[in-house]
Each structure stands twice: as structure tokens, then as C-alpha cells.
Amino acid sequence: MPEDDDTRTTVNPYVLGQLSRAITTAAEHPDTAVRQRAVKRIEQWEEVFQGMLTGTLSVGTRAPVQDVPAWVTLEVVQGGFATGNLLAGGVLQPHELELLARLKRAPDNTGRAALNIYYLSSSRTDERSPECMAAAVRPHRVIVS
């Protein structure tokens, strides 16, 4: 994103309103479960707000997160605002850690990318499930009306 882009520091009233609403709910709602969900929403709206301020999020664009391709699935909050978090991210699962160990790769911040490359490589089709392989080669029917 360009350095002179004024949208980086523009404060969006909708974002601030949602953040304020979540803070109020977390502090005042009588139901504990509702308050806990509100705390999660506070975290999400803070991420949106921080991303807008730092310029890592560009609201209203096809690829709103800096350095992330448009095809990556993002976490999105009410109103269609990306938080900057990737849905395919998160803590590596036990089976992923086991495979990384077999591949002699460290479970660092490149671990999931290494797993994706491994599973997408043509030499690793033996480890893909039959369902996955059937879906990969199934022809798609196009209906023209």
C-alpha cells in the first residue's frame, strides 16, 4: 500500500461503533457466555482497527490484507471487515507436527506452508485420501440453460 494513502489512518465510524458495542456487552451483559463472546469480538475489532491504522488492512479492496493474495480465506467480522487473520492458520495440529517431524522440518512459522507444498506435490499422492483424489479428478458438469 502506498505511503501517501490517506485511507491507512482514516478512522471508520462503523468499526469504532462495533468495538464500543462489544466493550459494552462484555462489561454489562448479565449472561456470562454472551460476555465471553463479546471479549472475542473486542479482540477481532481491535485487530481491524489496528490494521487500518498501520496500513496492513485496506478496507474495500479485493485483497484487503497487505502481502496476502486475494485467494486466501480471511477471518471476517460483521460488515465484511477482514481482521487480518487467516482461517487456515492457527496452532499446528498433532498430525501436522508428526508429519513435520517425518519431513525433518521445524514447526516454526513456515511449517504449514511446508505441509501444503508437501501435500500438493505430485509425488505425494499416495498420502492423499481416496475421497480427495476422486474429487481432484472428477469432471465438473456445466449446465447451460
Image (cartoon, helix red, strand yellow):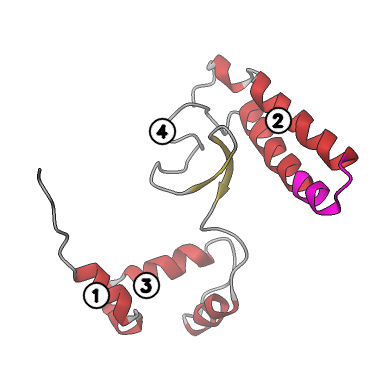
Residue 124 visible (yes or no):
no
Along the line of sight, which residue is nearer the eye, 4 or 45? 45
Which quarter of the figure has residue 115? bottom left
- Judged by depth in the image, the label closer to the viewer, 4 or 1, is 1
Magenta stretch contains residue 32:
yes
Structural distance between the alpha carbons of marks 4 and 3: 27 Å
State the residue position of label 4. 62
Identity of the residue drawn at 58% across and 42% down:
84
Identify the mark nearer the N-term, 4 or 1: 4
Identify the mark nearer the N-term, 2 or 3: 2
Query: The disc labelled 3 sits on which kind of residue?
Result: Tyr
Query: The disc labelled 2 sits on which kind of residue?
Result: Gln
Query: The disc labelled 1 sits on which kind of residue?
Result: Ala
- Judged by depth in the image, the label closer to the viewer, 1 or 3, is 1
For the record, the magenta segment spans: 29-38
Identity of the residue drawn at 64% across and 29% down:
54
State the residue position of label 1. 134
